[in-house]
Amino acid sequence: MGVIIGFATIANLNGRCAANVNWGANPNTQRLYCLNGSFAPFLEIERPTVNVNMTIYSPGPVLNVEPSQSCTTQDSVAEATVYINPAGCEVNMPRVNYKMVVNSYSFAKDDGQMPGQETFSMVRWVNNEPSYVIRGIAEGTASLVGGDTSNPNVARKVGVVFNGNTSVATQGSVAAAAVGRADAIRMGAVGKVGGATATTGETGRADVSIPHTPLWM
């Protein structure tokens, strides 16, 4: 195990410095077997990915997440440029420097005096890269205490730009002898994420799921 020193580490997303980051890899191995009395696979196919979760202080970059209308490539839907240069003790870790596909976004600002935080979950297929990556319809929710997120300018405060019609619901929680919380949330298809502008005295949350389908031709 190596020790990473936060004060000496550099991490950013589209040039915005990160508050925290974690990253890793997945071989995504598919094994095919035969009925031949052996556990040795007949064929192995690997489609490895690099995965990054990065949180930055708002306002972050505004990223397009509208669905593909053609045979898009990985680079054409990779809206985020991620750079991580870890510094540590007894560890020599390679830098992460990729254009990455954003598959989820969230925003949180629960303290009116503190800045909001935007979290981007990202992936990139490496080595055996897909021929195409098709982005589906992004679905998300947005809430801002004291604000009507049906107003596009208000929804942008939590880093969400809706496409088309939306619906409204409420959510909340409370315990006995405690103070609870209730929020009105707006839900719908999302065209852009990031760039939250909620300011001092405002609190809110957002969550967006952005599906992608890799295709190997």
Image (cartoon, rainbow, N blue to C red):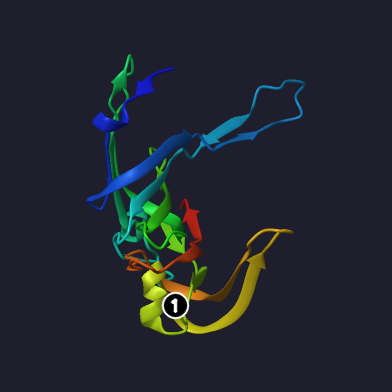
* 2, above or below 137, in the image: above
Q: Would residue 70 be visible to someone looking at this image? A: no
Whole-percent x and y of residue 186? 54, 77
Along the line of sight, which residue is nearer the eye, 174 or 54? 174
Residue pictured at 31% horizontal, 31% vertical? 6
Label 1: state its secondary structure: strand
User: Furthest residue to the top?
Assistant: 90
Along the line of sight, which residue is nearer the eye, 50 or 75? 50
The image quarter containing residue 51 is top left
Amino acid type assigned to the residue bearing label 1 in the image = Phe
Q: Would residue 156 be visible to someone looking at this image? A: yes
Residue pictured at 42% horizontal, 38% vertical? 22
Whole-percent x and y of residue 194? 35, 64
Residue that numbered label 1 is attached to: 162
Q: What is the count of numbered marks?
A: 1
* 128, above or below 74, in the image: above
The image quarter containing residue 11 is top left
User: Furthest residue to the front?
Assistant: 177
Residue pictured at 45% horizontal, 64% vertical? 135
Left or right: where 207 falls relative to 195: right
Residue pictured at 64% horizontal, 67% vertical? 172
Left or right: where 3 falls relative to 209: left
Whole-percent x and y of residue 197? 32, 68
Q: Residues within 10 Å of mark 1 (few under 14, many from 20)?
A: many
Left or right: where 40 falls relative to 190: right
* 64, above or below 43, in the image: below
- Position of the N terminus, as image quadrant, is top left
Left or right: where 153 falls relative to 150: left
Whole-percent x and y of residue 96? 31, 37
The image quarter containing residue 126 is top left
